[in-house]
Amino acid sequence: SQQGEEDPQALSIQEGENATMNCSYKTSINNLQWYRQNSGRGLVHLILIRSNEREKHSGRLRVTLDTSKKSSSLLITASRAADTASYFCATRDRPGQGGKLIFGQGTELSVKP
Amino acid sequence: EPEVTQTPSHQVTQMGQEVILRCVPISNHLYFYWYRQILGQKVEFLVSFYNNEISEKSEIFDDQFSVERPDGSNFTLKIRSTKLEDSAMYFCATGQGTDTQYFGPGTRLTVL
């Protein structure tokens, strides 16, 4: 089954604007994580939100989680050209290690200087 | 900051050949994973490995795939007889007991 579907698939904004990406999932989760992938590179962990949390901040990142709607959003404020990358949400059904991450399709963000 | 490293960065092979992809985990990490990403598609889980055995594997991880930690440091993924559809980026990830997984830069496998 599909899990972690992001929208939009692609987003193009000007430097300084905010970027919002959404993720929906289908099954129960323990936590949801957002990763960034620069072109041709590995995935970098950005932020994690647990199922009992509604909002979390880290620097210019703000993530929300609505478990009733099975959705999450990632907001990047005051975007920079260096934020250009693909952003993926990933869910885990249990805490701790040993559990796989289930990734969405990703949102390709382009920030124009 | 410690990083997960992977070699080679790009591997080209003929269909039917065996390939071994290598990963050096972050030193105190005990949990290891392989994922793959076919061009333009989502990242897919292949297998997780802990305490020298497979913890979980996906449907993709069939008998053609195997993993091992031969020398206590490297973590390898072997594909015995590659198919065209095995062409993808293969990512190793490692973790130390928390929810976060740390990904390597990937190996691009091209099967001709």
Image (spheres, rainbow, N blue to C red):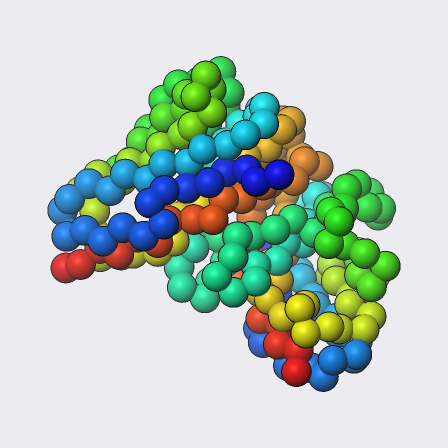
Q: Residue at x 73, y 47 (%)?
A: B58
Picture quarter containing residue A24?
top left
Q: Which percent across, then down, holds residue A11?
A: 27, 50
Q: Is residue A45 left or right of residue A73?
A: right
Quadrant where the N terminus of chain A lies?
top right
Q: Is residue B33 left or right of residue A6?
A: right
- Which of these two is toward me, B68 or A6? A6
Q: Is residue A91 visible?
A: yes
Vertical order, B65 against A49 (above or below): below
Q: Which percent across, then down, holds residue A14?
A: 14, 52
Please, which residue is most extreme toward the front here?
A1
Picture quarter containing residue A2?
top right
What is the total number of numbered labels drawn onto the structure image?
Answer: 0
Q: Is residue B2 visible?
A: no
Vertical order, B61 against B12 (above or below): above
Q: Which percent across, then down, holds residue A40?
A: 45, 66
Vertical order, A107 against A56 (above or below): below
Q: Residue at x 61, y 58 (%)?
A: B36
Q: Which percent across, then down, holds residue A5?
A: 46, 40
Q: Residue at x 75, y 62 (%)?
A: B77
